[in-house]
Amino acid sequence: MKESVKYAITAVVAIVVIVALSLVVKSGNDRFSQTLENLNDTLTTQGDQNAIQPNSQQNNNVVNVQVGSDVVVNTQPAQTEPSANIPAPPVSDPTSAPVTETPDTTPVVQQPTGGAPATVGNNPETLAYLNNAVNTMRKLQNFTATKDQDINISVTDCSMPAFLSIINGVVEGMAGVETYTYTFVNGYATDPEERTQVTAMTAIPPTDIDFNLMADGIASLTSTSDGVNTTYTIVLKPESTTVDNAIPQYHGATMDCFDLTTLDIPIEITEASFNYSGATIDITIDAQGRVVKYHEKMPLSGVGGGKLGFLSAQATLEGYLDETWTIQY
């Protein structure tokens, strides 16, 4: 095979891998970035004098968060006759040093306010209760959270069909099932994927913003109870994105949606038309009002495209992200 043809194949694979990974959320970004870097290295070394040389510089995103009371004892003997003399109230010793209280600098963590809503449904009371419960958990200082994640994606069509099986092989190698445990102490844990210090607000989606269910984005909200815990199931309304508006409003406020257009790569993204058919969120809360499990399943399908020099490609994909966080206090 001619070197120029090898270069073209490798470039197409790089473009479509970017498109296919539009489903991969924060936890998959590093694997994607590393693979793309390897592809860029291949492009640089395999191109011949007749091949168009792409920019091989690529920056990986680093994801980089009492005062006791004085007791006065009357030691005078009991009087046998009533006395008109009423003892004066105790007077503090003016020579004693004033008592100074040391201010408590321990961070105050907001606790869930109020009990479970009287009526479960898409109403302000229920949404405020759930939003507060999830965000309170994510701001606690000491707890353990275990993430079970399943990413399943496949490219169903490609503008260069001969390479479809190659592309799917690359994509499937980046998807899969993973389990990670985060132990938060004084607000921080070591991210087992990136080996960096993170807060729960960073590790547990949505990254670095408050969890926010909004009434206009909810298709249904129901609850079930096992006598101890109550699970609230929320189904979001379908949303779609474009290359100019890459984050869906309601999905993006409750979970991590991969923004294809923000990657620092030498490939121009020309299309990012994806359909979020309506993610399901399950929030399980115990009798004390604490979140003990948080689950999200986000189906996705659509078309993405990009170009590198004179080469361009378009791909159709479908798949889902299924992620569960189990919380232990």
Image (cartoon, grey):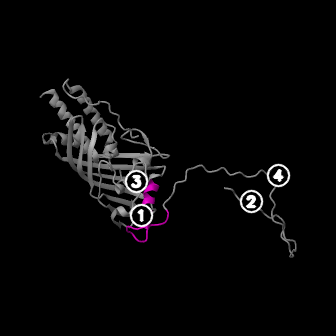
Mark 2 and mark 3 residues within 8 Å of each other at the beta carbon:
no
- Mark 4: give few (<14), some (14-19) or many (20+) Cα within 10 Å: few
Check disc 1 and report the residue beneath it. Answer: 127
The type of residue carrying mark 4 is: Thr
Judge whether residue 295 is colored magenta. Answer: no
Marks 4/1: CA distance? Answer: 57 Å
Residues in magenta, as a range = 113-137
Marks 4/3: CA distance? Answer: 55 Å
Check disc 2 and report the residue beneath it. Answer: 70
Mark 4 and mark 1 residues within 8 Å of each other at the beta carbon:
no
Q: What element carries label 4?
A: loop
Marks 2/4: CA distance? Answer: 16 Å
Q: What element carries label 1?
A: helix
Check disc 4 and report the residue beneath it. Answer: 95
Count the labels in the image: 4
Position of residue 295 measured from the top left corner of the image (x, y, whole percent): 34, 56
- Tell which tag, 1 or 3, sits nearer the viewer: 1
On screen, residue 8 versus residue 229, left or right, reads left
- Mark 3: give few (<14), some (14-19) or many (20+) Cα within 10 Å: some
Judge whether residue 116 is colored magenta. Answer: yes
Please tell me which residue is depicted at 33% across the width and 39% down the height of the picture: 30
Looking at the image, which residue sits at the far bottom? Answer: 82
